[in-house]
Image (spheres, rainbow, N blue to C red):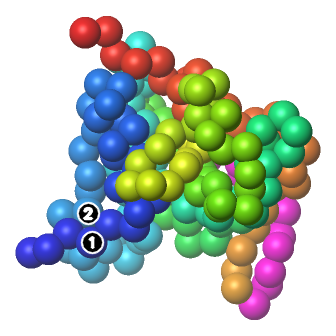
């Protein structure tokens, strides 16, 4: 079976591998588990060295611009199915696991300043693309979510609120000791 992942997931996995953070992709069981449970499945189980294991749903977003402070966090929407599925899987796995979203922002060429920002450690180059990864726990997201589109069944967290609850992945999960 050929595993198909988005470039966002490939970049996230490469980022973790480079930092020595173990993870398991659940892609191999995605179709079987979804058929049995009816729930949307998350993408990874991540085992940071100094934190609880996490159930991660990667949300890939394109960032058209970066502010003066290098801020890419603009699009913060998820579907209600994302919320329900991640919450249910969190209940199945129990308190030893933290359900969370990783928003993987791909900075477009029009974002500018990407080369100088890569040196800050907040950005990651993979396959000639630049990414920025931000973690937000499901509980924090639910606490501040608001409806976005009834038709598309999406919710969002306002930009300023999202800045308050999301953290750069490198700060949350430091590289594993070698």
Element on which disc 1 rests: loop
Q: Quadrant of residue 77?
A: bottom right
Q: Find residue 4 and name its label.
A: 1
x and y percentages locating residue 43 in the rendered image: 38, 56
- Above or below: residue 125 compared with residue 150: above
Q: Quadrant of residue 61?
A: bottom right
Any part of residue 134 in sight: no
Q: Quadrant of the C terminus?
A: top left
The residue at 31%/9% (across/down) is 177
x and y percentages locating residue 6 in the rendered image: 39, 67
The residue at 25%/44% (across/down) is 24
Q: Which residues are magenta?
A: 137-151
- Neighbour class for label 1 at 10 Å: few (<14), some, many (≥20)? few
- Above or below: residue 177 compared with residue 122: above
Q: Quadrant of residue 116?
A: top right
Q: Find residue 27 and name its label.
A: 2
């Amino acid at each position: 079976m050929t595993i198909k992942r988005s470039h966002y997931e490939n970049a996230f996995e490469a980022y973790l591998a480079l930092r020595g953070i173990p993870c398991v992709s659940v892609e191999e069981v995605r179709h079987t588990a979804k058929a049995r449970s009816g729930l949307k499945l998350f993408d990874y189980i991540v085992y940071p060295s100094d934190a609880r294991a996490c159930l991660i749903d990667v949300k890939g977003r394109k960032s058209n611009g970066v502010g003066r402070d290098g801020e890419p966090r603009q699009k913060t929407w998820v579907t209600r199915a994302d919320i329900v599925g991640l919450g249910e899987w969190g209940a199945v796995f129990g308190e030893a696991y933290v359900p969370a979203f990783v928003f993987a922002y791909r900075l477009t060429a029009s974002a500018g300043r990407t080369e100088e920002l890569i040196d800050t450690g907040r950005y990651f180059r993979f396959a000639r693309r630049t990414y920025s990864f931000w973690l937000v726990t499901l509980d924090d997201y639910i606490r501040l979510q608001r409806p976005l589109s009834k038709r598309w069944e999406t919710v969002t967290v306002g930009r300023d609120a999202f800045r308050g609850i999301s953290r750069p992945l490198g700060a949350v999960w430091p590289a594993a000791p070698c």
